[in-house]
Amino acid sequence: MTAGHRSWLFPSGFGYVKMISSQLTSEFQVINRGINGDRLIDVERRSSRDFLNKNPEFISIDIGINDVWRRFDSSSPTSDFQFLVSYEKVINQTTKILLNSKIILCEPFFLPHLREHDKWVEDLLGKISVIHFLAKKYSLPVVPFNSHLNGLTEELSWRALAKDGIHPTRLASNVMAELWLSTFMENQIEH
């Protein structure tokens, strides 16, 4: 971190985070702590090392699709209740230690394209409901990645947004960056 600069921590992805970083003024330093394949429990375990001890002004959390994915590719499910408990623990630890940090939650997204994905969607929507519940409980903004990107599939092919339904293309990363910045501004978070 550079002294005198505001810091952002985005524990997710590289595409849209890089685009957000390029659109912020030089007073901001973006630190990306996302690790491919991580689930919420991994963020919970790493939170003190990754962001609690760095005293960022803003923290953006985009997690959950791997919690869904592991249920179906590794028979390692994360129940909505487990997801709630872990997510709330991350929020509580953050708000207790970083009294002045602002948290922004993001919906994980998935663009279903096969009939067998109906169960994925059901699981994902449970995780998204948890995120919205916690956002309401703690008065935190939510970036609606899933609902927005799925809405775009009415005009665009899902492949134009995520070739496998999960990993965003450059186009989707641009859309996500714009949506994140728009949500940020709509919620009048000082920057």
Image: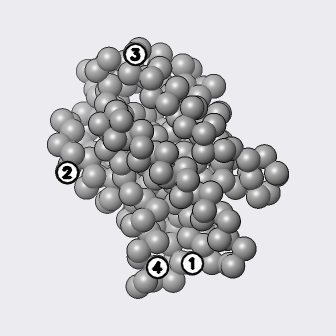
Q: Position of residue 163 (x, y in %)?
A: 61, 73
Q: Residue at x 27, y 52 (%)?
A: 183
- Quadrant location of the C terminus in the rendered image: top left
* Distance Cα–Cα, label 4 vs label 1: 9 Å
Q: Which residue is mark 4?
A: 153
Q: Position of residue 97 (x, y in %)?
A: 41, 14
The mark nearer the N terminus, 1 or 2, is 1
* Distance Cα–Cα, label 2 vs label 4: 24 Å
Query: Which amino acid type is shown beneath numbered disc 1?
Result: Arg
Q: Which residue is mark 1?
A: 159
Q: Which residue is mark 3?
A: 96
Task: Give the crowd class for mark 1: few <14, some 14-19, many >=20 residues within 10 Å.
Answer: some
Q: Is residue 134 left or right of residue 68?
A: left
Coloured how? one colour
The mark nearer the N terminus, 4 or 1, is 4
Q: Is residue 159 left or right of residue 172?
A: right
Find the residue positioned furthest to the front: 81
Q: Nearer the viewer, mark 4 or mark 3?
A: 3
The one of 41 and 8 positioned closer to us in this rendering: 41
Give SS at disc 2.
helix
Q: Quadrant of residue 8?
A: top left
The mark nearer the N terminus, 4 or 3, is 3
Q: Is residue 77 left or right of residue 14?
A: right
Q: Residue at x 62, y 57 (%)?
A: 123
Q: Residue at x 21, y 39 (%)?
A: 189
The one of 14 and 182 positioned closer to us in this rendering: 182
Q: Which residue is mark 2?
A: 186
Give SS at disc 3.
helix
- Tags 2 and 3 touching, CB below 8 Å: no
